Image: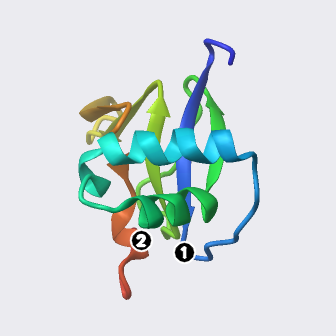
Amino acid sequence: MSPSKQRLFFLSTGFATFRENADRMSEIATFLNRCGLFRGFDAERLNTLSQAAEEVLFDIGETILREGDAGDAMFVILEGAVQVYTQDQDGREVVLARLEAGDHFGGQALVPGGTG
């Protein structure tokens, strides 16, 4: 993987299933087991999640979501980091959080009636 890319695990409300090699699915399931959000899940649930999700790459500095966008997915960071920020009244960037491998965002979008 290029050092200029970030790897995120993408869980969509559509849960479009795709098949990838078993080793890759096992790697993602193992990673999710270490992620606080999914720590209590059994192997079957972790495998189901890893099969029903998509891995996406983003360039460093690329905007993933904008404040106010309708959410339809949850992201788990596999590698790299994501900066959550807003702009103050003068248009300056204000960092709210820095998320790293194992962190997640957008989960509210998966809750019925959630907006992201």
Q: Position of residue 39 (x, y in %)?
A: 26, 52
Residues tagged 2 and 1 counted as in contact (Cβ below 8 A)? yes
Q: Amino acid at mark 2?
A: Ala
Q: Is residue 103 visible?
A: no
Q: Nearer the viewer, residue 53 or 70?
A: 53
Disc 2 from disc 1: Cα separation: 8 Å
Q: Residue at x 42, y 74 (%)?
A: 110
Q: Amino acid at mark 1?
A: Thr
Q: Is residue 14 above or below residue 106?
A: below
Q: Name the outermost residue toward the bottom.
A: 113
Q: Position of residue 24 (x, y in %)?
A: 65, 40
Q: Which of the 4 image quarters holds residue 93?
A: top left
Q: Position of residue 1 (x, y in %)?
A: 68, 18
Q: Residue at x 47, y 24 (%)?
A: 80
- Secondary structure type for disc 2: helix
Q: Nearer the viewer, residue 55 or 107?
A: 55
Q: Quadrant of the C terminus?
A: bottom left
- Secondary structure type for disc 1: loop
Callout 1 crowding tier (Cα within 10 Å): few <14, some 14–19, many ≥20: some
Q: Is residue 102 above or below residue 2?
A: below
Q: Residue at x 35, y 47 (%)?
A: 33
**Mark 2 or mark 1, which is nearer to you?**
1
Q: Nearer the viewer, residue 87 or 81?
A: 81
Callout 2 crowding tier (Cα within 10 Å): few <14, some 14–19, many ≥20: some
Q: Which residue is mark 2?
A: 109
Q: Which residue is mark 1?
A: 13
